[in-house]
Image (cartoon, rainbow, N blue to C red):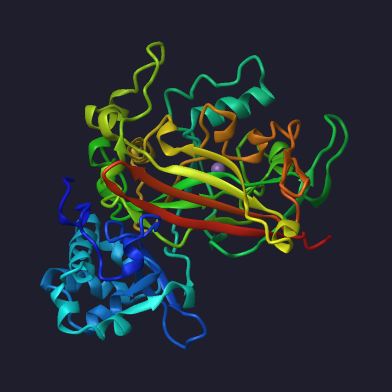
Amino acid sequence: MTLDHTHDPDRRSWIQSANDSTTDFPIQNLPFGVFKRRGANEPSRVGVAIGDQILDVAACLSEGLFGPDATSVAESCCEASLNPLLELGREAARTLRRDLSEILRIGSPVFERDHAIASRILVPTSGAELMLPVRVGDYTDFYASIDHATNVGSMFRPDNPLLPNYKWIPIGYHGRSSSGVVSGTSVRRPVGQTRDGAEGPPTFGATRRLDYELEVGAIVTTGNPLGSPISLDDAERHILGLCLVNDWSARDIQAWEYQPLGPFLAKSFSTSISPWVVTLDALEPFRARAYPRPADDPAPLPYLFSQQNTNAGGVDITLEVFLSSARMRDERMEPYRVSVGSFVDMYWTIAQLVAHHTSNGCNLRAGDLLASGTVSGALKESRGCLLERTWRGTEPLVLPTGETRKFLDDGDEVILRGFCERSGWPRVGFGECRGVVLPARTA
Ligand code: MN
């Protein structure tokens, strides 16, 4: 991938809000999602976020705005998920991106000819309902932050926080795709088996240790045939882009159930996904080197090592978590920022996750979701879940109302935000991934 006109920092849109330096969605971003007008009896379809508007790709198709190559790609955007577009692959999406940028730029012949076209191809985001962007096939959740793994390990194994496999193998587990929900969907506090002491029998009831996990999700575009691994340097061709993921977790249920086979019902009750998929193409100016492994760390095995991955396998995404209690919302307080970190702190890159996942011949398919695992950094302020942030509840958070939190209360809203900023480039953001905690059914 080299930079092209779609990345030009000087390119501006005729949509004024897209030129605001604080928007997540300048003309250089163009993330894909699925929407319909709120309350309208119309099919959901693919849209592209631009400033405070959504560009309706199907409407652009009806207006005949695409060139011949992009027209056939745009035809896949009349569906209620990104899956048909994902099936076409990353190169096809790039062809569409180039035409979208041409349509939206200042000086676009389309707009110059007919200013009224704006009302036919744009929908204000404030008047739209955003859907789950992808019909997720398989969902795999990794554990790619070494700081997260070390912090969590040290709570349970103070003498031996990091297991011996960690620096060799990207650890993951197979999650549940059926319970993925779009940002804005409330999340019901789950019930399950928990055990208070180390000796007594478990009880069945609402979790008392509900947590979030700040994660980045990678959306698979074209997959690979069963039996044909994807090589490290080819891996990103199979990823359309990234989104924000909240892997809600019930820590007490998890602690009791996870041995010996790993997370199960502690995670599968809901996973929140942000509505916009930011393409790897849009993220190109924000690439970074992979995690700098200290000299005494082992070099990755050959199938997980390449110079290209070492030099540019990372992505510098600033990631924030905000919490807003019901009382804070009643008192009209701004959400409280619980943490801020960066995706560059991950020990394993996205390409390494893909290469490892398929190294045994396992086939990925268009629409699969690969989540990074909790994104934590070395600082206390960059710990991406409450388990770490409050150190298992021993260092409670104090909210601006004076309320304290060890884990999440009913009514709490968790808001994940992500954005890329680099001098000389317009900010490219992910928007938000939100969810309010509802009381357990038995409560
Ligand atoms: Mn997770």
Residue furthest to the right in view is: 200
- The picture places residue 145, in percent across and down from the top left corner, at 49, 32
In the picture provided, is 431 more to the left or to the right than 231? right
Write the residue at 61% across / 56% down.
270
- The picture places residue 310, in percent across and down from the top left corner, at 28, 28
Q: How many marks are shown on the rendered structure?
A: 0
- Image-quarter location of ligand 1: top right
**In the figure, residue 271 lies in which quadrant?**
bottom right
In the picture provided, is 93 more to the left or to the right than 252? left
**In the figure, residue 389 lies in which quadrant?**
top right
In the picture provided, is 248 more to the left or to the right than 45? right
**Quarter of the image that includes the C terminus:** bottom right
Considering only vertical position in the picture, is 194 above or below 105? Answer: above
Q: Nearer the viewer, residue 108 or 272?
A: 108
Is residue 105 among what the camera can see? yes
Residue furthest to the top in view is: 296
Q: Nearer the viewer, residue 332 or 377?
A: 332
Considering only vertical position in the picture, is 29 above or below 103? Answer: above
Q: Nearer the viewer, residue 265 or 180?
A: 180
Considering only vertical position in the picture, is 275 above or below 357? Answer: below
- The picture places residue 212, in percent across and down from the top left corner, at 62, 47
- The picture places residue 192, in percent across and down from the top left corner, at 76, 50
